[in-house]
Amino acid sequence: MRKKYLIAISFFAVLLASCAEKEKYTKKPFYDLHKKHIGDSIFLNDDIKKIIFIDTSYEIDSIVFSWYSKVHGNLKSAETFKGGKNVFENIEYHENGNIKKYLFVDEDNPNYYYERLYHENGTLLKITGYLFFQGFIVDTTSKSLDIKKGTTINYRIYYPNPPDCISRIYIKNDDGSIYDVFKKSSFLNFMQTTYQDNNIVGTYKVNIMFEQRDKSMDTTFLYNRAIIYKVVQ
């Protein structure tokens, strides 16, 4: 009898060791266009589990992924966090792989959001909240909107980008002309960027226009916001 117990214990020990070997975490760094290390992607086997940002200027701590099954299951959710709270893009999926909920949340006010709910077959059911974006100026020498002369500033626009919509960001002049100068991020589906040199002292206003064409309803929505800043000596 004792021998049988030893065999059983040995069998389960081998089984647990085998499972431990299969559950393997790996970390891969990712970089911006200037090859700056801005974060790491964490994988469990072949499934991505988490993206961790080490560059705090991105306003994001992490993006957390969950899956319906440990073995080749569909994605269940992808949530963006800062300070333990959901910010920007957060998506839930039905088990069949179709989107269930798309939520874009304001970084500063969780009660300000844009949400889309979907049927299991992919049909849009309901839209609540307000269409908006959040814009940031990234400057390596200043945390305010007083920009030192000769400094190149970077705009980062975080915006709702549901899969059943076509979303675009433009610079809009006071005369109504628009310029498509933004470039979509290679690693964030909900961020576009552009840059601007500042060689003349003065106060400036940049009008940013967000255009979203909803393919489900065949309609187009517009949202405009102005960013005002100063170029100083």
Image (tube, rainbow, N blue to C red):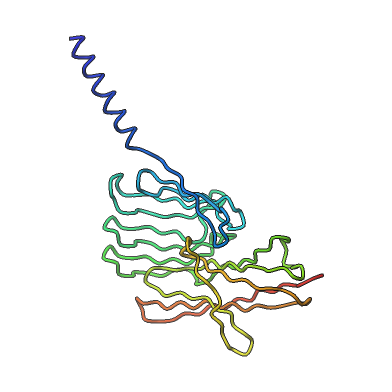
Q: Residue furthest bottom?
A: 175
Task: Tell me the residue at 75%/75% (across/down).
Answer: 199
Q: How many marks?
A: 0
Q: Residue furthest front?
A: 35
Q: Is residue 219 above or below residue 187?
A: below
* Horizontal and vertical percent position of residue 94: 30, 58
* Horizontal and vertical percent position of residue 119: 30, 65
Along the viewing direction, whichever of 115 and 182 lies nearer the viewer = 182
Along the viewing direction, whichever of 195 and 129 lies nearer the viewer = 195
Left or right of 199 in this view: 158: left
Left or right of 125 in this view: 152: right
Task: Tell me the residue at 38%/62% (across/down).
Answer: 101
The quadrant of the rendering that contains the C terminus is: bottom right
Residue 7 image-quadrant placement = top left
Q: Is residue 71 above or below residue 222?
A: above
Along the viewing direction, whichever of 189 and 114 lies nearer the viewer = 189
The quadrant of the rendering that contains the N terminus is: top left
* Horizontal and vertical percent position of residue 90: 45, 59
Q: Is residue 214 above or below residue 8?
A: below
* Horizontal and vertical percent position of residue 47: 36, 48
Task: Tell me the residue at 44%/81% (across/down).
Answer: 220
Task: Tell me the residue at 59%/77% (across/down).
Answer: 208
Left or right of 194 in this view: 211: left
Q: Residue furthest right?
A: 233
